[in-house]
Image (cartoon, rainbow, N blue to C red):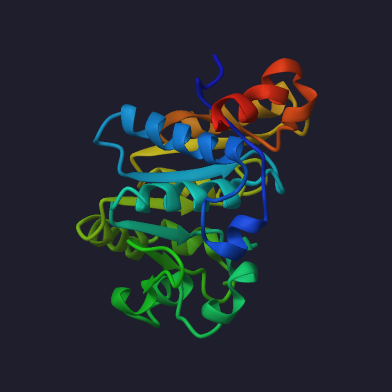
Amino acid sequence: MAPKSLNSVVESRNLFFQTGKTHGDFRTQEAFKTLRSNIQFCGSEFRTIVFTSCIPNEGKSHVSYMTAAAFAELGKKVLFIDADLRKSVLRKRLHQTARKTKGLSHFLSGQAALSEIVCPSETIDNMSLVFTGPFPPNPAELLSGEMFRLGLARLEEQFDYIFLDAPPVGSVIDAAIIAKECDGVILVIAANMVSYRIAQSVKAQLDKTDCKILGTVLNKVDMKEHGYYGQYYGQYYGD
């Protein structure tokens, strides 16, 4: 059985990383609000959530970051962890901040204290960030270590929600390792990019972690191609 949908359709926009706000077009705003609500309806026990995808370039980093921002807008104390120690999107987009801040790889390798790697967002109230730090030669080994488990447990005492951006499951094992320490996992799938067979294979891999799959997010959907709903949704509800 495929993972249930969180009923969220997101049109990806690089603008969000540049502004740090959720003030894109109306459909996109509503999609993230819906995703936020559906996560809350999963239960209060799901506070540490990892986002992953099947293959690269499906938009998981964008979706996870904006979901974290949506929760911060509710006044929740939120932490976003860039746990993609192989190809960080956040580090590229927020380069000026990331390059002067110690990151996750520093902590996992014993080069920094936990307090040194958590920095407040410069654009979003109630939200803090953990950057990757330098890409290590052994990311899977570092994530499998005791430092990651203990560090995450300590951070859970300080924040209402923690969202982690992990590498694609179909490419490396990192996301499955991270999921073992999380309350839930959300799979981001880009429209018309991933086959049913690959999606089922990724789901099977995540099932082995015993981390509950909260659902899927269908990303990069061209709403203009979906007839009446896509054409009139924003006009009707935006009035």
Q: Quadrant of the N terminus?
A: top right
Q: Quadrant of the C terminus?
A: top right
Question: Is residue 203 shown above or below 81?
Answer: above
Percent x, y for residue 7? 52, 24
- Residue at 56% x, 59% y is 84
Q: Nearer the viewer, residue 110 or 157?
A: 157
Q: Quadrant of residue 113?
A: bottom left
Residue 162 in the figure: left or right of residue 44: right
Q: Is residue 117 left or right of residue 201?
A: left
Query: Could you say where residue 198 lies in the image, as x and y percent from the top left?
Result: 70, 29
Residue at point 35%, 47% (across, down): 181
Point out the residue furthest to the bottom here. Answer: 100
Residue shown at 55%/43% (left/top)?
Answer: 52
Q: Position of residue 118 (x, y in %)?
A: 36, 72
Query: Vertical placement of 119 versus 206: above or below?
Result: below
In this view, which residue lies farthest toward the left? 157
Does the image show residue 42? no
Image location (x, y in percent) of residue 43: 27, 30
Q: Residue at x 32, y 61 (%)?
A: 126
Q: Within the image, what quadrant is residue 117 found in? A: bottom left
